[in-house]
Image (tube, helix red, strand yellow):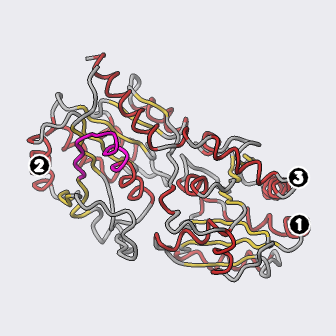
Amino acid sequence: MQNISRITLIGPVYPYKGGISHYTSLLYEALKQKHNDVTLISYKLQYPRFLFHKPQKDYASDRFKVDDTQFLLNTVNPFNIFLTGRIIRKRNPDTVIFQWWHPYFAPCYRMLCQILGKKVHKMFICHNVFPHERFFLDKFLVKLALRKGDSYIVHSRSDARDLLSIKKNAVFRHNPLPTYNAFHITGMSMLQARRKLNKGTDEKILLFFGFVREYKGLKHLINAMPKIKSTLGEITLMIVGSFDKDKQKYIELIHKNNVTDCIELIDGYMPDNEVEKYFAACDLVICPYESATQSAIVQIAFGFEKPVIVTNVGGLPDAVDDGVTGYVVEPRNPEALAEAVRKCYTREVIKTFEENIRKQAYRFSWERMTEVIEELQNDLYVIK
């Protein structure tokens, strides 16, 4: 059997923002620990400004910095893509791993695959086969790139179905999104985190974290808060994330439900070094999504051994074991969310969930992720 030795990993990494940037860094470190010869190539230009108006980089914390990163790839410059492909090919890698999450990258990645040729194993890690917000020609673009791959890793069953819809005989593995435990930077305890946030020791605290988008279903959680409040008494929901242009409609919904006293809005992008205190302070993390493939928020929560309430969409039920590490409820259902929160605060359920999260650590480990990569490499070697 052939073992992976020379790997080129392509994707965003510090100082680029976001969960996939964190993922790329953690995967790089995990592959290095297995004594692979890993080259990390990131973007000289990820998105042009006219397509992505917000700042793409965050220098506030270098927790996920990879010193050896080579920022070579300009995703809109064919001449640059050609040269980068030639550089990669000259290094004679056994495997090139592409981070895939949006059809925008299709022309760039397809061109790289063609330059690399048939001898190089081209693996796509699919965070989303199709984008969250679908658009005209997205399926065409996805096919343009992904059909050039040799193997694939998906993090949800829904993504597995999507992959097979565009490549019927795809060689792939379904592996849960690994745990983002690197945010536990200082080892802050719940008591220390609550002191930082001026929260009481015995206060019940819920957390909704991340960019606020319509598909994430925050409105359903806000609509659940009156019942949660009437059932459990004093409780706080911290909503931490960037609202962009939609903030006012959520404020109006909070007032309409008369829950201004139990909801705290912390608006804005949260730098990596500020994440820890919110997860350390809370009892539960809630992801009331209307649609999803998977969510890095769940894996950040598990990194802090926090139970999660999720909805039965996409890959979320693959990550949260219902009644074991959290609860899975139907989407768009405030009553179900409220009932799940109520159950979490009865009969020491939260402590039991925390113990179960610890027991399942290997399933969500980066070590397991590297083993899956090796399995795919070996499978492809046997097929060839």
Q: CA distance from mark 1 to mark 3?
A: 14 Å
Amino acid found under the numbered disc labelled 2: Phe
Amino acid found under the numbered disc labelled 1: Leu
Q: CA distance from mark 1 to mark 2?
A: 60 Å
Q: Which residue is mark 1?
A: 232
Percent position (x, y) of residue 370?
A: 39, 38
Residue positioned 60% across, 50% down in the render: 291
Q: CA distance from mark 2 to mark 3?
A: 61 Å
Earlier residue among tags 2 and 3: 2
Residue positioned 61% across, 70% down in the render: 278
Query: Which image quarter holds the C terminus?
Result: top left
Q: Secondary structure at mark 1?
A: helix
Q: Give the residues drawn in magenta, as a range.
A: 28-40
Q: Which residue is mark 3?
A: 347
Judging depth in this view, the residue of 376 and 200 nearest the camera is 200
Residue positioned 28% across, 28% down in the render: 3
Tag in front: 1 or 3: 3
Q: Secondary structure at mark 3?
A: loop
Percent position (x, y) of residue 381?
A: 27, 21
Earlier residue among tags 1 and 2: 2
Q: Which residue is mark 2?
A: 82
**Badge 2 local density, few (<14 within 10 Å), some, or many (20+)?**
some
**Badge 1 local density, few (<14 within 10 Å), some, or many (20+)?**
few
